[in-house]
Amino acid sequence: MRTAAVVIALILLLLCTIVLGVTCGAVHVSLRTVILALLHSRALSAEDRVILMEIRLPRIFAAAIVGAALSAAGLLFQGLFRNPLADPYVIGSSGGAVLGATIGMVLLPQVSWLGFSAIAMMAFAGSVATIAVVYSLARVGGTTQVVTLLLAGFAVSTMLSYSSYFVEVLDRDYGLGLRVLASWLHGSVEVPRWTQLGVIAVLLVASLASAAILSRRLNTLALGDEYAQQLGVHVERVRIGIILTGSLLAAVAVSLGGLIGFVGLIVPHLARLIAGPDHVRLLPITVLTGAAFLVLTDTLARTLLAPAELPVGILMAFIGGPFFLYLLRRRKRGYAT
Amino acid sequence: MRSLLSFERVSFSFGHRRVFDCADLHIENRTCTALIGPNGGGKTTLLRLAAGLLQPSSGRVLFEGTNITDLSRRDVARRIALVPQQLDIPFMFTVQQIVEQGRTPYIGTWGGLKARDRKAVERAIELTSIGSLRHRIYNELSGGERQRVKIALGLAQGPELLLLDEPTQNLDFGRLVELMALLRMLHQEDISILAAVHDLALIPHTFSSVVLISPDAPLLVGSPQEVLRPNILEGAFQCPAPAFDFNPDVYPRGEFAL
């Protein structure tokens, strides 16, 4: 089967990017050392062990999770809005995340739980809360107008982003906090603890399972809400499912990597070039491509200017922006790709 | 005998604009019915009420004697299919993928298409003769081809009643003749048809009965000979009688097979 072959190829690609990520970095660890350690024939040196187990591997897994979550969220929202230009933040989760992170930074700088900083937790809470507000604003008389959802999301998100500047102005240690916050907002994958990865991995698996259930319905929604209703689909229920799942995925990504643009926009496009528009086939392909793509970009982000680091969001804008414009230009037909 | 589709004292309004007021209508099984009336008269609304997509503000819509609101959405979808005027699809779905969506009411959350579903899809593709289009992108098809694909999508639902909203729109003469032949064939396959049409000249040869929606008058149901009379149409369409100066009994049938 063709999809199975593509999925296997992508798993191999993901493994390759992970191996590349493990060996590359400010300190070079040779592939041979890693393989020998894996085969238990020779233990790692204490220094290599810390670099690999406490820094690189957790960060690579975090990048893979962020890439997978953002790409899957992008796919869900593009399907919901029947528009290939939607991204994971389209209904406003980014604004809530920014405000949440800022408040966490300013008010609760010392708090952490299971390894999550206050910034990460508040960003997660902020994006979920924003979606709840936007959704209830857009819901009129038992149904949700998709255009209202977009506009309400835009307005709320913009209001919240600017409110975060207000919180920053009120902060007394202004300078230092702002810098940490800025790096976070530009999207950089932090080095998580293994407990953090565990919690996030559970959330990711749960939301991907929900996305898998919804993927068949996304094909039906492509015919339009009324046609989907005619085919016996409970459109409103499916819509709530997509919004919840997509927002949870976006919040998962935000809590590990801040705001990283373009991934959620581009990866579903790439996947459609490979597999066509059928969402059932697209989901696994999108998830794996997104994971491999972000592991690769994050590896570049920490090696290009080593020992200094580039926030991966900036690199993504450099790579993703032009690539996206290229896709846009080659879009000759109405709804192509 | 129970009618296939019945409207019992159905009223419906969009806001303050009343479209139907205590309308009664009975469509018998195995009929091919044309729905005619002036623009904005409620043809599309009637079809959407019949498909259960709109609920009447009072009165009942019955399908084989059961109130349509008592049936689950999925049950309705297996028995009634509505082919809309417009079907715009984002992304590059192929014709085959689109027609397969017609099986949605038979597929559970996890399952894919089973042998029975594939058979129904093939049957729909065969009846509408779109086999040669199956791998084409829907968005790149011509108006006539899209019309056939939309009908195939409706047929894949396996309906007893097929509702068509202005299927003749944007069709050239050749495609029009093909479409009428298709409707007659579906009728012979024991699918009941209710189609909103504008071109009255198409009716006598293909449709066995006519429903006329006229402003401020009850729905009129009858054979083409009974309904397509200048004096009746004059009132409904508010247009002088000579415009309808064709005799339904002798209107061309053989030559163009309309």
Image (cartoon, coloured by chain):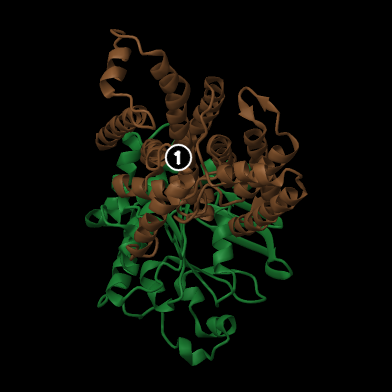
Under mark 1, the amino acid is Ala
Colour-to-chain, brown: A
Q: Residue A47: which quarter of the image?
A: top left
Q: Residue furthest left?
A: B132
Which residue is drawn at the image coordinates 63% and 43% (left, top)? A97
**Relative image position of residue A185 (x, y in whole percent):** 58, 46
Q: Considering only vertical position in the picture, is A75 above or below B90?
A: above
Question: Pointer 1: residues within 10 angstroms few (<14), some, or many (20+)?
Answer: few
Of A122 and A133, the residue lying toward us: A122
Which residue is drawn at the image coordinates 56% and 52% (left, top)? A90
- Residue that numbered label 1 is attached to: A308
Q: Considering only vertical position in the picture, is A312 above or below B45?
A: above
Colour-to-chain, green: B
Of B177 and B133, the residue lying toward us: B133
Which residue is drawn at the image coordinates 46% and 40% (left, top)? A72
- Residue A107 left/right relative to A1: right
